[in-house]
Amino acid sequence: MEYNFREIEKKWHQRWVENHTYRVTEDESKKKFYVLNMFPYPSGAGLHVGHPLGYIASDIYARYKRLQGYNVLNPMGYDAYGLPAEQYAIQTGQHPAITTVNNINRYREQLDKIGFSFDWSREVRTCDPQYYHWTQWAFIRMFESYYDRRADKARPISELVKAFETAGTEGLDVACSEELAFTAAEWNAKSEREQQETLMNYRIAYLGETMVNWCPKLGTVLANDEVVDGVSERGGYPVVQKKMRQWCLRVSAYAQRLLDGLETVEWTDSLKETQRNWIGRSEGTEMRFHIKDSDVEFTIFTTRADTIFGVTFMVLAPESELVPQVTTDARRAEVEAYLEATKKRTERERIADRRVTGVFSGSYAVNPMTGEAIPVWISDYVLAGYGTGAIMAVPAHDSRDYAFAKHFGLEIRPLIEGCDVSEESFDAKEGIMTNSPREGMTGCGLVLNGLTVKEAIARTKAFVKEHHLGRVKVNYRLRDAIFSRQRYWGEPFPVYYKDGMPYMIPETCLPLELPEVDKFLPTETGEPPLGHATRWAWDTINKCVTENSRIDNATVFPIELNTMPGFAGSSAYYLRYMDPRNDEALVSRRADEYWQNVDLYVGGTEHATGHLIYSRFWNKFLFDLGVSVKEEPFQKLVNQGMIQGRSNFVYRIKDTNTFVSLGLKDQYDVTPLNVDVNIVSNDVLDLEAFKAWRPEFANAEFILEDGKYVCGWAVEKMSKSKHNVVNPDMIVEKYGADTLRMYEMFLGPVELSKPWDTNGIDGVHRFLKKLWSLFYSRKGEFLPTEGEPTRDELKSLHKLIKKVTTDIENFSYNTSVSAFMICVNELSQLKCNKASVLADLIVLLAPFAPHLSEELWEKLGHTTSVCDAQWPVCNEEYLKEDVVKYTVSFNGKARFTLDFPADADNATIEQTVRGHEASQKYLEGKTVKKVIIVPRKIVNLVIA
RNA sequence: GCUCGGAUGGUGGAAUCGGUAGACACGAGGGACUUAAAAUCCCUUGGCCAGUGAUGGCUGUGCGGGUUCAAGUCCCGCUCCGAGUACCA
């Protein structure tokens, strides 16, 4: 009887749906295990064969854990808000909601074919009001919170207000955009508007002025990668740097905790490293400088306080507020021209074209250590957004300062013994200090000469503190997240405006649903697309008015027209899966305490500095509120590799319709053309299929080699235009889901990026057929019988149990597929038909090939799903060998092998080897210096 | 530029703590069965050399050194490839 995978897979898919096989509830009697994949954005192109890689890997793990007796949560959902659906809407008028639902349905159809153990009753979609209710809720909580640095957690803003009322900013240590100082009396004297304005400085979700790439013609903010050569990528409209009021999240307040948390999770070192770099902690010193003959003061940040005696100029960022203050009248025109010029350059241009530019302000600053007057320059190599937007320049020991000094002919003053700064700066933090201070300089008491750089930094820090010249400061590169998008297809903000200040819509009014609009473009007045939805604004506000007495009934309040960015909905979805239909809370206490956090998270590295940072931030915030019980959301993280396309090429001879095979192409003048990989097999083109592929090839002619047309190939991104997309549906149709699952795992380590190559899938398919033939003869007889397995059969089985168990734990699925192949080959050779052996084999296979396993499990007489079977345990007894082969080598060179009883002792082994006739040839006339015996493996004789 | 990975047959990839390469699979070649095809099964398959043959010898994990009885694995110095990051003071 044949292995009829189509029938089997259809049957079991239905059974699983009918029996709710994969539904999971909080079962206190069992240990939990939470497996999660990064949920997909349902794109219009559907799934290609690379998408399921991570899902299969985690599904295998989930099924394995379930077989080990765990209560496994393995949910799936959709990151449904996103730009492509909106762009499509702009072009076609098709509402994004419709496109999205269609795409989701298509995804679901494709996913269902692969046999995942997802609990679909827990599905979430970020665009579902029931879902984004809690995204909006979290935003409101962030608005209503500030970050208390002393307690190192978020607290209700009402507490901060109370503190202001009684003591002003006195004695507070809180995260803020700008250090403010006021007394209780001053606070109490502020108007409501002023108080609200002040609170913005502290809220975790706040409205802030930030620099953005603004495209006036498109009416939206653009990300850096959407701007090319100063114009928008779409349309080619000019883009300018502009300060805009945008919603921001104070992620920076969590920088240290985000860094510390990395120590507690099991992620790859490279991913942790990426996040560490992104957070960019740097310990340094802030020092105050004042401008000569003026009372203007400013602060700089440096990690090299030791180089204070080598400062030969100062630099301000062009955006710095100090620029107008330090610019002298004589220099004003030139400075303004420079500011104008830099404003026009986008961030991207600055990076691409790194020429040295700058302008002298006319003022001099005073070095606090030496009293020297040093010129203050303005240059765009200093960033306004990092540190204080001002630096002390030490050209001898910083390459950027060096380039600037060379360009403008400024002094370069080396401070480290023996360093050569004639060609380049000496940036390394090593060496012995000199010239600090230089001979004859009027000192202030600080002497660094003779110290190492490290010592000098510490000494200077202490000195600065002692003399109140500044303070020791830790800076982070991590910036607050800009949270506003001028887009339609995203979560609306639960925000309305009164007197120009934002207020939160009462939580009882949530979810604030995304309104219908008739156009998806910005309004004529330049407002985001939501500006088209005026009626909705009215209705919503009115609804709130009746439910919230604080709002004056007679007024119409403008609402927030921006929507939230993509990462809003994906930041806490793993919590929602625990309790997805709860209308009272994001997640119930009970579900949260049961499921805790994600034990195993699988997804791509491309989210290293996006989703995986935001999500950790979001979770920490919820942890502070007492909503999430774990501070880190994802305990273990596995990054699956990308599956690239393997493109095939045919070579057309120029100006003809003749195609030449790969080996002969160099003899002609040819143009390579991407050919559909689905009509190529082992790089050999199916000529008839090619002619039928496109009308223009209908009468193509070929120059063959050995009667075949051989195609060229290359690894490229999987995309329609390259004709290298392989659709999982096709593979499932041809070979079955179980083959697809096993083949994807067999392809190589899950973490590795590799090109998809359908060649080779036959090997895996053959394996499943072979397995089937252990159960059914060709004539259709059912082979398994009761009876005691032989020692060889047990050995083969238990070898497999051991291998597969450790392999799954290590995510080494490719080698466990190999182990299955070996075992089935052995059992087949042994003509094993013992039901007990086959039953264990089936359980081991169940995570990999669930449909086939279910079918055979049933055939063996079981009435329950194989999912509820028990994972077999390896009995080491069966693995023991009677005889062990030792490799005998001389001076490390292997010569022959000898068999020994497994329990032979070293003395016997040594004696036998020395006495063995094959040894004589090597030992003749030589003395054995040493004998090394590696247990059960090697005997090595070291001879003189 | 910096950081982190990686380099093993025609191909994808195996190889615990350093233990004597190339598991498993594909492809290729040969054979069996068959009228034929498909399917299935068996043999060979890193390179070179010797032998009718069983087999034996040499060489071999990007390159050059080193440590060791023993190196794909450890150390030093290169080359190339990939990923991330980009004026962070």
Image (cartoon, rainbow, N blue to C red):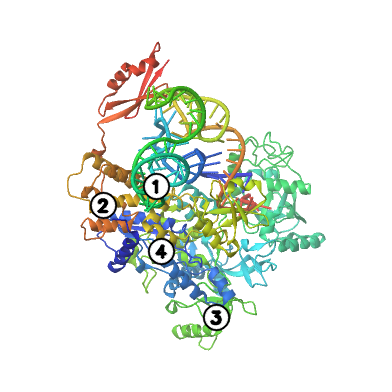
Determine the CA span between mark 1 and mark 2: 28 Å
Q: Residues at badges 3 and 2 in contact (C-beta under 8 Å)?
A: no
N-term mark: 4 or 3: 4
In the rendered structure, the residue with mark 2 lies on which chain? Answer: A
Residue A111 is tagged as 4
Horizontal and vertical percent position of residue A665? 62, 48
Q: Amino acid at mark 1?
A: Ser
User: How many angstroms separate mark 4 from mark 3 (CA)?
Assistant: 32 Å
Q: Looking at the image, do the residues carrying marks 4 and 2 touch, with CB atoms under 8 Å apart?
A: no
Q: Secondary structure at mark 2?
A: helix
Q: Are marks 1 and 4 on the same chain?
A: yes
Q: CA distance from mark 3 to mark 2?
A: 61 Å
What is the chain letter for disc 4? A
Which mark is first along the chain, 2 or 1? 2
Q: Earlier in the sequence, mark 4 or mark 2?
A: 4
The residue at the point 55 percent across, 85 percent down is A556
